Each structure stands twice: as structure tokens, then as C-alpha cells.
Amino acid sequence: MPPALLSALADRSFVFDGSPAWTPEHARRVLAQVGSEAEAVRVLGALQRSAVPVPREWLGDRLTILWTLFMASRSQADPELLTLWLSEHLRLLADLPHDIAALAIDRAVQSARHGFIPSIGEMRSTAEPLVAERARMIERLQQVVGTDE
């Protein structure tokens, strides 16, 4: 995302007039100063397209690989357990955007210190702040460009 747009969407650090830390008017002024008004529309579209849920097939494949990596050497690797585990993980992670789901799974694996498959909670603890930030950016951009959808 262009720096001017990031600046326009960020909360202002010092507000002395009693106004909110962020306003669409201030963001529009920042973008107008650098001529990036059209960029806001383009980025809004890209963010909205990126906010759709992860493809179920990709998520199923990725989680199956994860199961295989952690369970292949274990004697209790049961296909029925895989089916149950996979269906529950698919259900509870399916709402995440693709890029955020991929990052959350990777970070959970990278930080797993217990030798077991990372939990849904470990994955979602990475994903939730990113989803919230993306939603906030979309909401603010909609206000800036005047499309409160």
C-alpha cells in the first residue's frame, strides 16, 4: 500500500481540537495533497477482493499437509481422526481470507514449541488482529471514497 494512503488511514497522533483521531475529511486532505485520490479507489477494490474467504480446497490441502507433517511418525495416526480434525479445522478457519489463513498457519507452525499440531486458537490468534485491521482499512477507505457499503 502506498505510504500516503497508509498515512491517510492511520490515526493522527496529536489531535488538539477535540476531533476524533481519524476522520474521512482529514484522510481526503492528506490524499489530495499528494494527488492519491484515485489510488484510494484502486486499493479499496483490492482490499475488498482480498477479504473473501480462503478457498476450501486450498485450506483442506494445507491442513492435510500439516496433519501429515505432525502425525506421520505417530502410531495413532488414524484416518478417522484426520477426518474429524480436518472437518473441525475447516469449519473454524474457513472464514479467514486466503493470505491471512496462510500466514496464520505458517506462524503457528513456526512458533509451535510443544511438538504437537498447532491448535485452531494458535492460528486464530495470529489471524484475528490482521482480519480486524483489514476490516478497519476497508471501512475507512469506503468512507474516504464515499461508498459506505
Image (cartoon, rainbow, N blue to C red):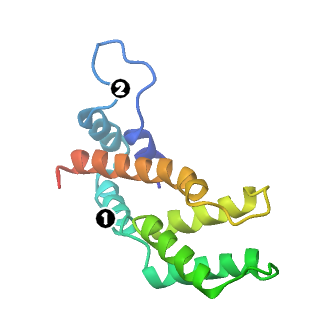
Q: Nearer the viewer, residue 61 or 79?
A: 79
Determine whether label 2 and label 1 are within 8 Å by CB.
no
Marks 2/1: CA distance?
A: 25 Å
- The image shows residue 37 at horizontal and vertical percentages of 29, 51
> Is 26 situated left or right of 76 in this image?
left
Numbered disc 2: secondary structure: loop
- The image shows residue 82 at horizontal and vertical percentages of 60, 81
Q: Is residue 2 above or below residue 23?
A: below
Callout 1 crowding tier (Cα within 10 Å): few <14, some 14–19, many ≥20: some
Q: In the rendered structure, which amino acid carries the disc numbered 2? A: Ala
> Which picture quadrant has residue 52?
bottom left
Q: In the rendered structure, which amino acid carries the disc numbered 1? A: Gly
State the residue at coordinates (56%, 74%): 85
Q: Which residue is mark 2?
A: 21
Q: Is residue 64 above or below residue 3?
A: below
Q: Which residue is mark 1?
A: 45
> Which picture quadrant has residue 107?
bottom right
- The image shows residue 136 at horizontal and vertical percentages of 36, 46
Numbered disc 1: secondary structure: helix
State the residue at coordinates (41%, 27%): 12
Q: Which quarter of the rendered picture does the C terminus lie within?
A: bottom left
Tell me the number on the disc at residue 88: none
State the residue at coordinates (32%, 63%): 48
Q: Nearer the viewer, residue 144 or 124?
A: 124
- The image shows residue 33 at horizontal and vertical percentages of 34, 40
State the residue at coordinates (61%, 60%): 119
